[in-house]
Image (spheres, grey):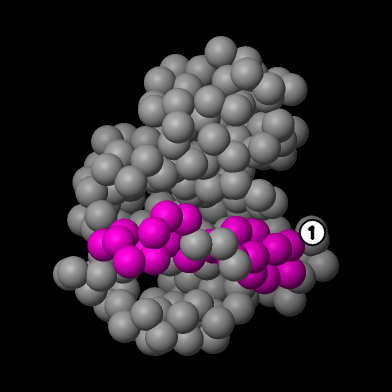
Amino acid sequence: MSDNGDTQSQFIIKTFPVGPLQCNCSIIGDRISGRALVVDPGGDADQILALLKQLELKLVAIIHTHAHLDHILAAGEIKNATGAPIYLHQSDQFLWDMVEQQCLMFGVPPVSLPNPDHYLHDDQDLGCCGGVAIHTPGHTPGSVSFWFEEYKTLIAGDTLFLGSIGRTDLPGGDFDQIVTSIKERIYSLADDAVVVTGHGPNTSIENEKVANNFVRA
């Protein structure tokens, strides 16, 4: 589990792999208000809930970078346990509706999920830690990144990885679009910002501008 930043600071971020495909789930919280977001609960609901309890945080929203199965599988369990609403970009509703087919495709036990309560939109205030949603389509039509400017932290989902980018050969993927999203939206953020990726290790915007195999600044 990674913990970015000073543990004594107001900002809490805990990132850890969950579910059958080891998607990075993040709990983002504010020690002063006690409010928290869960990003991409792709499985292991009990682990996520236990950590929220340990950190003494109240979950105010379950937010998704996109609707591939490995990022959404535990959303229903987390909602049932906490009452927190589910957020998704509307352009990924078709993938959300296909979750059972996605499970079959990847050999994962199927789940049924409640519908999202709200749709995310570009530049939306996330209501916690000063976070803002940034629409970064390409991996999927509704891919969203979450930017926490004060803490120089970006949750990029499967849009940007250490040295790589998200695949675009699945339904709704678009290579030209993901390149545009990265160049125009992500690479315009602070160079020293930490990028929490959807799978694998963190990186930085500066590092990817210089060394990414697919999209350089």
Q: Quadrant of residue 216?
A: top right
The answer to whether 9 appears left or right of 22 in the picture is left
Residue 142, placed above or below residue 70: above
Residue 52, placed above or below residue 210: below
Q: In which quarter of the image is residue 63?
A: bottom left
Identity of the residue drawn at 50% across and 62% down: 3
Residue 39 visible? The answer is no
The answer to whether 188 appears left or right of 15 in the picture is left
Q: Quadrant of residue 6?
A: bottom left
* 23 magenta-colored: yes
Point out the stretch of residues depicted in magenta. Answer: 4-25
18 or 167, nearer to the observer: 18
Q: Quadrant of the N terminus?
A: bottom right
Residue 8 visible? The answer is yes
Residue 34 image offset from top left, x and y in percent: 23, 73
Residue that protrudes farthest toward the top in the picture = 217
Q: Quadrant of the C terminus?
A: top right
Identity of the residue drawn at 73% across and 69% down: 20
Residue 174 image offset from top left, x and y in percent: 63, 26
The answer to whether 160 appears left or right of 84 in the picture is right
Residue 130, placed above or below residue 167: below
For disc 1, the marked residue is 105
* 179 magenta-colored: no
Residue 62 image offset from top left, x and y in percent: 38, 65
Residue 54, placed above or below residue 204: below
**Amino acid marked by disc 1:** Met
210 or 52, nearer to the observer: 210
